Every structure is written in C-alpha cells, then in structure tokens.
Image (cartoon, rainbow, N blue to C red):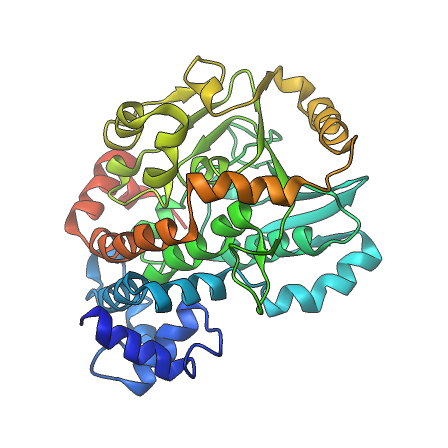
Amino acid sequence: MQPEQARTIYDQLTAGRTQFLRADELCRRAAAAFPSLLPSDAALAAEAPRMQREKLGLEKAQGLFLSQVLADPAAGAHLCHAMLLPLPAARTRLAEYESRGELDLGGAHVQRVGKAAIVTMRNPRFLNAEDESTLEPLEMAIDIALLDAKAEICVLRGGEVSHPRYAGRRLFGAGINLTHLYQGKIRYLWYMVRDLGLVNKLYRGLARAEVSPEVDSIEKLWIGAIEGFAIGGHCQAVLTLDYVLAARDAYMTLPARKEGIIPGAANLRLPRFVGARMARQAVLAERRIDCASPEGRLICDEIVAPEEMDAAVTRTIERLTGSGVVSAAGNRRAFRISEEPLDSFRRYMSVYAREQADCHFSPALIANLERNWNAATRRA
C-alpha cells in the first residue's frame, strides 16, 4: 500500500476529512470496506485468545495502513487531530465528576483538590503497569482533568500498589504489562491508541473539532510526581509534562531493547532533555537514569525526600497557580512550535506505526520476554 492509496481510503471513510475517526475505528471501517487489505473483526476475534508467540501477525496490516495514512500530510494531520479530541465517554461522565469532585474509572482515578485535577494511575497488582484495562480509563481521566473548568492545573501520579515488595507504596509505574504482552492480551492498536491519544493529550491538550490543534486547544500545565520508578511507558509520559517532581530514591528507565519494542515517542522526545548520545544509551543500552543524578535533573525539575512528596505537590500547585495561569496554554504552544510541531510528530508516528507492528510480532520479542522477564512462569 502506498500513501496515495491510504489517503484515498482515508478520505472515503472520513467523507473527505469532514468526519473524525479514531485509529481503531478507522481500521475497523477500512477492514469492512476493503477486506483484502485489513483483518476483519471476526479474524481479530479469533486471533485474540492466542498467546503472543502463536499469533499470525494479522495486525501488521493495520500497522502498514496507519503508517501510510500518517505519512500523508493531510490525512495524517487529520488523524492526529481526531485522536486529540475528547472521548465521547469523557464528556458523558463529566457531569458526574463535577457533581462528586472525583471519579473512579478503575484503571485511573481523577479528583479535584483545590485548584488541581489529580489523575492517579492505577493497576496495583502489576505495579501500575499499563495494559488494556488501563488504556481507556487513563485517557478518560486525562480528558476529564483537562475539561474540568474549576481546575487550573493537572497532576499525574501513580497510586498505591499491592505487590508484596512495594505494598502500600505509591509507584509512578512499571511501563507496559509484560505479562499481558507475552500472553497475547495486548493488541497492536493499543500502542497507536495510547501514543496518538492519551500521551499526546498530555503534551498537546485536547483538540477542538473546528480548528487545528496547532492553533487552539484545551490545555493546562501538568505536574508529574515520580515515586519509586518511571519505567518504559511511564518514563515516556514524564517527557510530556511541564514540571516534574521526583523522590530522591526514584529512577527512570526505557528498557525497550530488553522488551523488544519501540518506547513510544521517547526516541523523538528524550534527546531534547539529555542529548542524542545519552538517549541512545537509555533506549539501546538500558541505561538507568536516577532522578537525583545530574542526568536525572535534566528531566526532573525538583528532587524531594520520598516522605515529602505530598507536601511538594501541594506547594508546587500553589506556586504555579499563585499568579494565575492565563498564559499557560499559550506558552505551551510556543514551546511546542519549535520543539515538536504536529507535523514532526505525524512523521515520527508514521515510522513508529510500521516498526512497532514488526516488533510486536517478532520472535525476538518472545525470546526477550522469556530471557529477561521469565514471562513463561508468570501468571495473569
């Protein structure tokens, strides 16, 4: 498939780019309209129960299709725009949140505390790892935090976990759920929905349907609070935040090579913080970055004692909102236009869509998980 063909299909399915479709719905409709190009719902349903090593790789066609859509400037920008719109379910539950001041979504929790909307990532049994159970709840929580008219600022934090080694402690998060990945419980489109959706919303805010996200969006500053560790996908999220607090004993890693996948948009964003050489060391050679180290301080704004994190979050909220936040959205856009224009992100995601599909179904991924994670012995 060439970009021209992908654009023709995209324009047909979106009525000449007058309708917005999210990446998963786009693939579903494309499969129904062009069954020779993409796997059907029935084929994907038959594939879903298989262990990752037993899958036929049908979803690689989705990766190629999305890669070619994103490679086209017009279609790709429109898809990025679609993925930045608030989830319909978020708007539906916004009134419930506003009446209660909080909302428990299972895989995430959002609560207004004073001037802030605090989003807590939750997957306690798996050290707050991300998987299919957290994908929609976390994006919905991010949407609601940004839509909350009474909140001036947002906070991203990990919840308490139940793992015996860390029981009762908050952890920012352990990245993708490698047990579920090995067991075939994470679909290929999970990566695309996550990185075009919730992670990019942290970085760019929520789009408005009538105008390009480059021109206007619903944005707030995001504070991050790293406790324990920010591994893999959680480290990727840190790179989108405006002010990062970190516990003195916390660390960050991007063990993508050990896992056998590409770490989201970290390859695009990490070099801006630590330089190209160290970014390669982190992604390709598993370099650990301690938050309190000189390298970690290039990513983290403030290092605090673990027991002082609650007070530090409160203090930072007050400091960043004390003089008002009227210019916050404008300043975020001004930084982005030189750091990462939407078109640069689109081009990156075109490569990511294709390469991550190959990685997701590579025998090397299974070998890496068995060698480095003892995945064959772990329980769901």
Quarter in which the N terminus is drawn: bottom left
Q: Position of residue 324 (x, y in %)?
A: 77, 36
Furthest residue in direction left, as rendered: 363
Q: Is residue 286 left or right of residue 136?
A: left
Along the line of sight, the residue nearer the viewer: 19 or 102 = 19
Q: Where is residue 99? Give x, y as percent.
A: 84, 59
172 displayed left or right of 346: right
Q: Nearer the viewer, residue 309 or 264?
A: 264
Residue extending furthest bottom? 33
Which one is in front, 321 or 236?
Answer: 321
Give the answer, above or below, for where 249 lies relative to 154.
above
Query: What's the residue at 34%, 42% (across, down)?
Result: 263
Above or below, comparing residue 182 to residue 278 in the picture:
below
Q: Quadrant of residue 252?
A: top left
**195 vs 160: above or below:** below
Residue 148: x and y, percent? Answer: 74, 53
Residue at image location 66% in from the left, 52% down from the top: 146
> Percent from the top left, x then y, of residue 138?
56, 52
Mark yes or no: residue 295 visible: yes
**Quarter of the image holding residue 340?**
top left
At a point 29% along the width and 28% down the height, the residue shown is 276
| Residue at figure coordinates x 39%, y 21% from the top left | 289
Q: Is residue 226 left or right of residue 91?
A: left
